[in-house]
Image (cartoon, rainbow, N blue to C red):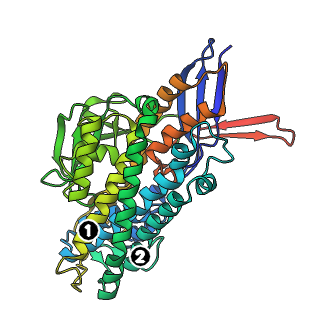
Amino acid sequence: MPRTITIDPVTRIEGHAKITLQLGDDGKVADAQFHVTQFRGFEKFCEGRPLTEMPSLMARICGICPVSHLMASAKACDALLAVEIPPVAVSLRRIMNLAQFVQSHALSFFHLSSPDFLLGMDADPAERNVYGLIRKNPELAIDGVKLRKFGQEIIALLGGKRIHPAWVVPGGVNEPLTTERRDQILAAIPEAKAIALKTITWFKQSLDQYQEIIDNFACFPSLHLSIADEQNKLNVYNGNLRVVDKDAKVLATGVKPADYHTLIGEAVENWTYLKFPYYKPMGYPEGMYRVGPLARLNVIDSCGTPLADKELAEFRQRFGRVPQSSFLFHYARLIEIIFGIENMQKLLDSRDILDPFVRARARPNRREGVGVSEAPRGTLIHHYKIDDHGQMTFANLIIATGHNNLAMSRGIKQVAQHFVDGNHLTEGMLNRVEAVIRCFDPCLSCSTHALGQMPIEISLHDAAGKLLDVARR
C-alpha cells in the first residue's frame, strides 16, 4: 500500500512549513511536496495607505529581514516620486543593506545550518542545535554571535534600532551619518573581517567530507537570476536583472526593474501558500530558476573587491563557472559576508559619506513604481500603484524565497529519493530532507502572499479528534 511520510514542522528555518513524502509500494520515495502552511496578506493590507508609509509598513513583514523590505519598498517609492536621491543617501542605504547581509548570512550559516556540518546529519536532534554547537565548538558559536552582532549594530547605528528602523524613507534617508558613528563602525571592521576569513578557511577545509551531500542536495541544472551592475559586478542594492543558464549562457541582461514582468511569471498550486515564480520565456514549471547567494555568484563576472574576488576565483576553480549544488549556498554566503565587509569599509572611507544632504523631497509624480534590490535570500521585488492622492491601490511582492520555490520543491524530492528508505527509516534521513531547505535559508513569513484567490482548507474536529466537517475554497 502507498504510504506518506510527513515532516511537520520543518525546523531551523524562519516561518512555518511541512514536507510530505509519498512512498511507492516498494517503500521508495515516489514524490515530495514542500508545503508553506502560513498565510500573510501584506499585499492587501497596504491598500489605501499613503505611499510615504510603505517602507516602514513593509518592514513589518519580517523581523529577520526588515532592512531588505525597507530597501525595495523605498526604491519603489522613489520611482513613484520620480526623484533621483542624493548620492550619499545611496551610499548610506547600501551600507545598511550590506550590514543586513552580514547579520542574516551569519544567522543562517552559524546558527541554523552549522549544527548539521559540525555535529553531523545523523546526530541526536536533542544535541543538533545551537546549544550542541556551543558545547562542541564554543569558538565557532561565539564567532557567529559576534558577526551577527556586528551587522545588527551597524543597522542600529544608522537607523536607530536593530529591527524595523524607520530611517530609510522615500527620497533617501532621514538622518545623515555622524563622524562618531562612522568611526565606531570602522573600528569594528577588522575583527569582523578576521572572523569571516577564519570561518571560510575552516569551511573550505571541511568540504571533502560532504561530497555525497554536495552531489545530491538540490543539485540539478537550472537558471540563475539576480541583479548586477553595468560592469556585471556584484551589487546587492542597485542594478538590472540578469539571467544565466547552467553553462553561463546569458539569456537576459540589462532588464530594467520596471520590466521584471517580461521575465517573471507567477503560478499557484492548491497545496501551498507560497507562489511559484518562473522564467516566462520557458513557461511553468520548466522555467525554474534560483536566486540568492549561489545564483548571484553564478550571474556576475566578479565581486569587485579584492578578498571576495580571491575567494570567488577559488570557488569557481573548485566547482566550475556555474555550480549547481544548492549545498554551495552556504559557501556563497561566506563569500558575500567578506564582500559586504569590504564594501562597507570602502563606502565609509569615501570623502562625502558625512554629507548632510540625504533626502530628496517631492510629491507623487507617477502612478506606478517598481523597486528591486537583493536581499540575503535573493532578488526582492516590490511593485506599487497609487491613485491621485498618493494612496496605495495595488501591491505585488515577489520575495526571494518565492523565486526558489520550484527549486526547493524539486530539491526535497532529489534528496528524499537518494537518502530516504521508507522500509528502514531513520531520523537522520528526514533531517537531510529538511537540511536541503535550510540551504536556501527560506524566510516564509516574508514570502506567503496572495495571487488572486488562494486555496484554503479548514477541518473541524471534536474533543476526541474525530473529523466532523471540512470546508474548502
Amino acid type at image mark 2: Ala
Residue at the extreme right? 464
- Are the residues tagged 1 and 2 within 8 Å (C-beta)? no
> Depth check: 231 or 262 in front?
231
The residue that disc 2 covers is 166
Secondary element at tag 1: helix
Compared across the picture, whether 422 is left or right of 63 comes to: right
> In this image, 449 relative to 260: left or right?
right
Decide which of tag 1 and tag 2 comes sooner along the chain: 1
**Mark 1 and mark 2: span between their CA atoms?**
16 Å
Q: In which quadrant of the rendered image does the C terminus lie?
A: top right
Whole-percent x, y for residue 372 in the image: 29, 56
Of circles 1 and 2, which is in front? Answer: 2
Residue 340: x and y in percent read 31, 62
Residue 234 in percent (x, y) is at 23, 54
Q: Residues within 10 Å of mark 2 (few under 14, many from 20)?
A: some
Label 1 sits on residue:
78
Q: Give the quarter of the figure containing the N terminus.
A: top right
Q: How many marks?
A: 2
- Mark 1, other Cα within 10 Å: few <14 / some 14–19 / many ≥20: many
Disc 2 on helix, strand or loop?
loop
Viewer-proximal residue, 342 or 13?
Answer: 342
Q: Does 107 appear above or below 124?
A: below
113 or 27, nearer to the observer: 113
Relative to 200, say whether 267 is above or below. Answer: above
Q: Amino acid at mark 1?
A: Asp
